[in-house]
Amino acid sequence: MNAADIRPIEPSAQTQSLLDLFLIFVGADVVATTFQVGASLAGSFSIRVAIVLIAAGSVVGATLVAALAPIGPRLRVPSVIATRPALGFGGAGVVAGVLYVTNFAWIALNNVIAASVCAKTFGFGSETAWSIAIGLAATAVVWGGPHAVALADRVAVPLMLGVGVLLTVASLHAPRAVAPLPQTALPWWRGFDVVVGYQVSWILMFADYSRYTRSARGSGVMVFLALAGTSLWLMALGTVAATAAGNSDPGAMMAAVGLGASGALLLTLATVTTNFVNIYMSSLAWKSLVPSGRDSAVVWSIGLVGTALGAVPGVWLAQYTNFMIVLGAILLPIGGILIAHYYICANTADSGLLDALYDPLGRYRGFTIAGMASWAAGAAAFFAAGSIGGTLPSLLVSIACYVILRRWSSDLKSVDS
């Protein structure tokens, strides 16, 4: 199995267990950035209100990703390929470009947060040095392919869960800060959008790993449980820890809850396992655009660029909340379009579908009007929704727009014929 294989896998290769799929998504979501989402809410909401927003946003976001996960076992292709029927080759290429670029930011963010804690906790090495070391470690594992990632997750994820229990106990018993966090003017509906935006950042990996699993229904269940459970847990802890520290800096939060070395271990392992996924997703995106690219060159170039960006830590955390909101506006409509296409409009049992997915001159060539217009409409609805928040309007508008435009285009074809 290649590190970044975009071809459909054979049914005989669907041997990944549901447990492995669950661990991959847990390993992806048990990460410093999940913890940091909760911390980013602490300056705007009480712990109780923040946890309500986290619970609601985690369920909504995880449901959207989980609803698409069964497409992987059915089509046996990566996510960037599965977007082609809805958006066309050109539109799917735009999605691949978005995925490729934003994953550089995720790799850098993960490395910066873990490096901050390690440098403060262990007292040696700069944040830049720690960030580079963590980035290189994750890249080396991804270079070994999905099997190497699965083996690493089997060791790292249980260890992370154990340390996470220690973090939970420490956070719940941590004293409140003498100086409270500076309050920011983030309304509740934007807080909800931030949580959902973070969850749907995983939406473009809906089929990348589930395609190796045979059970469509089981894939959806495992993805939901992994994403919803880990987000609710770690985001809530982030809010509690930031309130205890009076500061959303990762190192300060770990110090405030009295979990120095163990906390650093948790965030380091979490960063490495999540960057497995980020590098792999970017590799698939690049190979969908340039199929002739060599796997090793693609993987290492992505890992090295993300690592290099993380070596300049200053700006990443300052713009974290805004990054989540922009991601939500971009990715939520794609989720709505794919749900509309695969569950309302399209017949995924079409015997010629797999061949068409790889034929740039075939029926999915160029851009689809329905897909691109619905993407634009959903993104516009996210920002235009005002005081009710952008999540549900963006989803509903993108789904409705796609269904209407698909039926309209079908009616035109019927008239022409």
Image (cartoon, grey):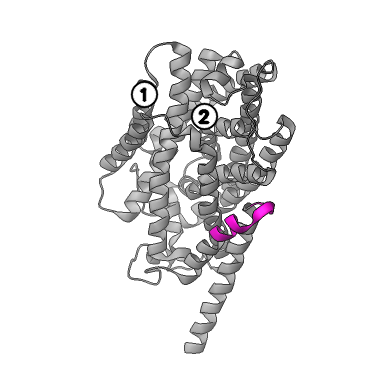
Name the amino acid, label 2: Ala
Q: Residue furthest right?
A: 48
Which portion, as a residue range, is magenta?
Answer: 379-389
Using the image, determine if residue 380 lies above or below residue 364: above
CA gap, disc 1 and disc 2: 17 Å
Identify the residue at horizontal 31%, vertical 34% (top origin): 304
* Horizontal relation, residue 98 to residue 412: left or right: left
Left or right, residue 392 beside residue 284: right
Residues 181 and 93: in front is 181
| Residue positioned most to the top | 123
Residue 347, percent from left and from top = 53, 68
Residue 260 magenta-highlighted: no
In the image, what residue type sits under mark 1? Thr
User: Secondary structure of the magenta portion, mostly?
Assistant: helix
Residue 409 visible in this rendered orientation of the protein: yes
Instruction: Check the image and report above or below for 59 versus 304.
Output: below
- In the picture of the structure, the residue carrying the numbered disc 2 is 32
Label 2 neighbour load within 10 Å: few <14, some 14-19, many 20+: many
Mark 1 surroundings: few (<14), some (14-19) or many (≥20) residues within 10 A? many
User: Residue at horizontal 51%, vertical 62%?
Assistant: 375
Frontmost residue, 65 versus 397: 397
x and y percentages locating residue 198 in the rendered image: 55, 42
Circle 1 — which element?
helix
Between circles 1 and 2, the one closer to the viewer is 1
Q: Residue at x 49, y 38 (%)?
A: 319
Q: Which residue is mark 1?
A: 128
Which secondary structure, mark 2? helix
**Can residue 77 be seen from the camera position used here?**
no
Residue 82, x across and y down, in percent? 45, 58
Image location of residue 217, percent across then percent down: 60, 50
User: What number of labels is visible?
Assistant: 2
Which quadrant, please, contains the N terminus? top left
